[in-house]
Image: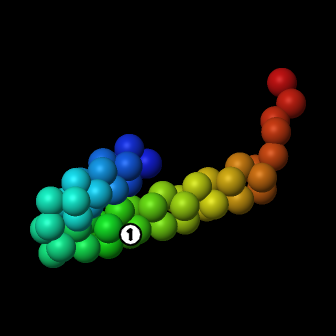
Amino acid sequence: MMSWVVTFLVIALIAGILGFGGIAGASIEIAKIIFFVALILFLISAVVGLTRGRRRI
């Protein structure tokens, strides 16, 4: 997911440099949404991992 964020940020930078403001703004918003979704999934995964603990073999 983080590669998608970087891809959309690069698209936004290129579009901003070339003067396509609408595309740049949309790409930034998509990148923000994907970043926060990835962050929430990471936090959920970390909490679940901590609550399950380590199993002894």
Question: In this rendering, does residue 48 appear at all?
Answer: no
Q: Residue 13's x, y, as percent?
A: 29, 57
Residue at image position (33%, 56%) is 9
Vertical placement of residue 33 versus 9, above or below: below
The amino acid pointed to by label 1 is Ile
Residue at image position (38%, 44%) is 3
Farthest top residue? 57
The residue beneath circle 1 is 33
Q: Quadrant of residue 48?
A: bottom right
Residue at image position (35%, 62%) is 31
Question: In this rendering, does residue 15 appear at all?
Answer: yes
Residue at image position (38%, 69%) is 33
Q: Is residue 8 left or right of residue 46?
A: left
Of residues 15 and 52, the one nearer the viewer is 15
Q: Residue 12's x, y, as percent?
A: 26, 60
Of residues 10 and 47, the one nearer the viewer is 10
Of residues 46 and 19, the one nearer the viewer is 19
Q: Residue 16's x, y, as percent?
A: 23, 64
Q: Residue 32's x, y, as percent?
A: 40, 68
Q: Is residue 9 left or right of residue 40?
A: left
